[in-house]
Image (cartoon, rainbow, N blue to C red):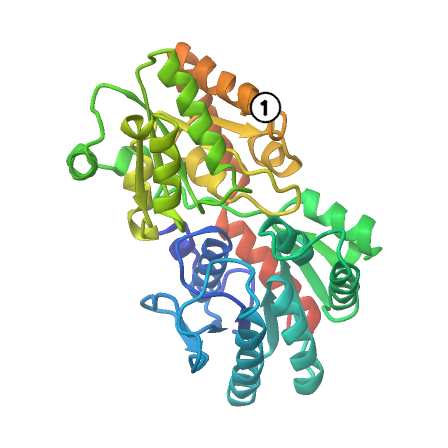
Amino acid sequence: MSEAGQVRKGEGEKRPLRILMIAPTSFFSDYGGHIRILEETRTLLAMGHQVRIVTYYKGSNLPGLDIRRTPPLPWHTEYEVGSSRHKIAFDVYLSIQSLIEGIRMRPDVLHGHMGEGALIGGVLSRLLRVPLVFDFQGLMTAEMVDHKFLDPNGLVYPWMYRLERFFSTRLPHAILTSSLRARQILHNEFAIPLSKIHPLPDCADTTRFDPQTISTEAQQKIRQRYNIPADRLIVAYLGLLTDYQGTPHLIEAAVHFKQQQANVHFLVMGYPDVDRYQAMAVKRGVGDMMTFTGKVEYRDAPTYLSLGDIAVAPKMSSTEGSGKLLNYMALCQPVVAYETPVHREYLGELGVYASVGDIAAFTRGIEWLVANPQERVRLGQLLRQRALEKYSWRAAGEEIVSIYCQLTSKK
């Protein structure tokens, strides 16, 4: 059972709430913000509340969750992860479905995830006369730039930025942020009062991601399935495969270790564009020392990730959260990361840092951990302890419910 499942019904609240979550994505998929939505929902359900999630028509249905999906678009049944022009149509469908579910459910509170969730939820909040909590996971315009869907110097960017500023400042009654850094961004860029913004960092499921509970037999099956060498130190990454997440930087790091003839192997887990990055690795001469697994289901993530001796976080975004770090920490893995405010917030002084985009420095960080096994163990143990002490979904759930209660006046 996850840590969320250990929250006892009735703790921190007296009356169950009806919560309608708006998730403008293909929930559930095994990456990023989806994990936050999942764990928040599990925590709230365990506390005795009713949660309904409205989302796009694709995605995995999970047991115990009330998920309501939009109809599929008649002309586009497949779409990419991240920004896409097709998302406009998806969000129109999501708006209609959210209104339908809002009328059916009569929620006490709306909980909108991501930018579009705040926009759709803001309109619905006025129609249903219920408060909106905006779960901010990064600037929508910044994400669109990261995905090269929006040109920061183009004519459209200022209009999108103004739109984001409008729905971020005017529509939500309260805002949750996945980091302290995100709170400062909203306050500094959009002049939102700090009293309206509540930092709620991503948390760790330290029960599932516990190295003591993962069997050697399960690990061996994965090694055999992917022909992962048993005699090499494993550098592990789990997340989206994109350029802005730093996937090409991992390939360049592997090139360095190949030149040094180091006993290192890179285990890269995630999607999309697996074939593209595999071909890139082969072209750079490191196809034999990199394993690309493709998509890893969240239920299997602890076992896959536990193969790593060193974890890496080459993400370069300065506004998005980075919840994958918490899984690394829970598994006692030392972490090499680009030094962004969000990464430092999670890892503190226990991370091995490189300046953002400095591939050589990032590679040296891995190299230092490879050469210092005692430091790997020490940092890993301290990071797990940090996850246990600072990042609990139980405490996060109590904070969310407290905010709900303040907004709905249900004490």
Observer able to see residue 17? no
In the drawing, does residue 284 fall left or right of residue 88? Answer: left
Q: Tell me the residue at 42%/30% (across/down).
A: 251
Using a 10 Å C-alpha cutoff, classify the residue at mark 1 as few (fewer than 14 neighbours), some (14 to 19) or many (20 or more).
many
- Between 204 and 353, the residue placed more toward the observer is 353
Nearer to us in this view, 318 or 14: 318
Image coordinates for residue 186, horizontal then vertical, percent:
76, 53
Seen at 61% across and 57% down, the residue is: 149
Above or below: residue 50 compared with residue 237: below
Residue at position x 43%, y 77% from top? 69
In the rendered image, the residue lying farthest to the front is: 283
Q: Quadrant of residue 293?
A: top left
In the rendered picture of this protein, how many numbered marks are placed on residues? Answer: 1
The three-letter code of the residue at mark 1 reads Ala
Q: Residue 288, position in %: x, y?
A: 27, 27
Q: Position of residue 187 (x, y in %)?
A: 80, 51
Q: Is residue 40 above or below residue 384?
A: below
**Residue 150 visible:** yes
Q: Is residue 109 left or right of residue 97?
A: right
Relative depth, front residue between 19 and 72: 72
Examine the image and state in which quarter residue 125 appears.
bottom right
> Where is the C terminus found, in terms of image quarters?
bottom right
* In this picture, residue 230 sits left or right of residue 103: left
- In the rendered image, residue 70, in percent from the top left (x then y), is placed at 46, 79
